[in-house]
Amino acid sequence: MRKALTAAIAAALAFTISEAPAQAEGDGRIVMTDKGAVSGTVTSTYRTFGNIPFAAAPVGGNRWRDPQPAARWQGVRDATKPSPMCAQDGLLGEPASETEDCLYLNVTTPAGNAKKPRPVMVWIHGGGFAGGAAYMYDARWLATKNDAVVVTINYRLGVFGFFGYPGLPGSGAFGIADQQAALKWVQRNARAFGGDARNVTIFGESAGGLSVCAQLASPGAAGLFHKAIIQSGPCAITSPSQPPGTSVKAWKPRAEVEQLGAQQPLGCADITCLRALPVAKLLPVHGVFVSPAFGTRVLPIDPVVAQRTGLMHRVPTLVGSTHDEATLFIGLLQRAPVPEAAYRVAVAGMYGESDADRIVARYPVNGNGDARDELARILTDGSWACASHDTRQQLGRVTRVSGYEFADPNVPLIFPDMPEFPGGYRAYHASELPLLFDMGEQLSPRQRELSDYMIAAWGRFARTGDPGWRAEVQSLAAGDIRPTEFVKDHNCAFWGQS
């Protein structure tokens, strides 16, 4: 997402030149939070405040500890810069970071005083629980077009957010606890920014969508939000693993994560030693810890179990995915064409010999000489689409649920250095993001219309719990917004999710 990152940085630097700054006294530039005053950037159409701490720095003795209260400050804190990037080793072309002190958030609002408290939308970024950052998501469209307050938050990632160790309280769920601390900050401070703390929507994509699942299942999140949007992060998602025929789930038991932490070759015999290690010494095992743990204070129950048993916060929920989720992942894993003669072997390597013939019969090759598009369709249906359908069905038993599928086949590719892919990447994983956030991508006039439609739908849902359509799943593509036969299109009966 290097292009997106570059665009986000450019947008941040351009805040003061893209529109004429307001000059009047009392223009909302200074806001008093519960910890002290912050001074942001004000233009004729929006206000932005960045780098606001919602918890103490998670360093030293606070490393691998549930988030602690931020300290008060004197004077006015400069909030004209966006929050930093949490420590990470780089993902899909993004830069690495060694910044452990990263529990900050950003706030974007329309300019001017609100006639009445505005709905609040809290964005939880994706990145496989290993990468990403709040500042990459320019929320001005969502804020100004919906008269809403939009908050984008950081949370600890990888080994810093999801590490476990025997006897360590909170093992494997520190990043989820960070998100909850940010939601508590919103409850305390929404009014100061013109927002309504009684009307908060959490929304996120990929790992951010899974984070929404976690907050729906967390008893400690009760009352912190009132609506939820899950984008390409269905609660019960699984993916093929090794050995063939096995699968990996998004969530792990706490004991498993603790055992994993004890096995790492970090040269330490106790948690005190581990807390003293420099960030660079931990980054080599960063990608080992990307599954939030349940059986913890913040997440006592597996979100999959919570979903199936109805033990979720019963708030209106919008659940969606993209039509071609897995083209991105197959493109990353298989950069060269896969000959059709090797198709069955590839399927068996993912799903095992016992299921290979059945899957190949359901998904025959199309004769283009490259089986990667078939592999992507299999993975899209089996791991993403039908899991999204399952989430809608399970949550729909206890609360109001709406659905969407982003299906525009020509959206710009926001990930750099991707190989050619048969038929193109189409509506790949994360392809809806440049229509919701200004990521610097060039959209066609029809895509701009679709962007406006989606932004309005997300805003309508944040205000009322209804995105504006009655279909079980609404297909969203430029020039083609309509109900879709989602279950049939993605062979969900075949995958046991009818």
Image (cartoon, helix red, strand yellow):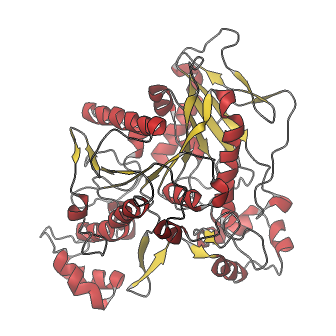
Q: Left or right: where does residue 64 sit relative to residue 391?
A: right
Q: Position of residue 256 (x, y in %)?
A: 63, 81
Q: Left or right: where does residue 432 sit relative to residue 10?
A: left
The residue positioned 72% from the left and 64% from the top of the image is 280
Quadrant housing residue 381: bottom left
Residue most extreme to the top? 24
Q: Position of residue 12 (x, y in %)?
A: 58, 32
The residue positioned 58% from the left and 53% from the top of the image is 95
Figure label count: 0
Residue most extreme to the front? 398
On screen, residue 302 above or below 410: below
Residue 87: tell me if it is visible: no
Q: Position of residue 382 (x, y in %)?
A: 32, 71
Quadrant housing residue 232: bottom left
Residue placed most toward the observer, 61 or 218? 218
Residue placed most toward the observer, 273 or 341? 273
Q: Left or right: where does residue 28 sit relative to residue 339?
A: right
Give the quarter of the figure containing the C terminus. Answer: bottom left
On screen, residue 120 above or below 415: above
Residue 174: tell me if it is visible: yes
Q: Position of residue 129 (x, y in %)?
A: 57, 61
Residue placed most toward the observer, 52 or 496? 496
Quadrant housing residue 302: bottom right
The residue positioned 66% from the left and 14% from the top of the image is 27
Residue most extreme to the left? 367
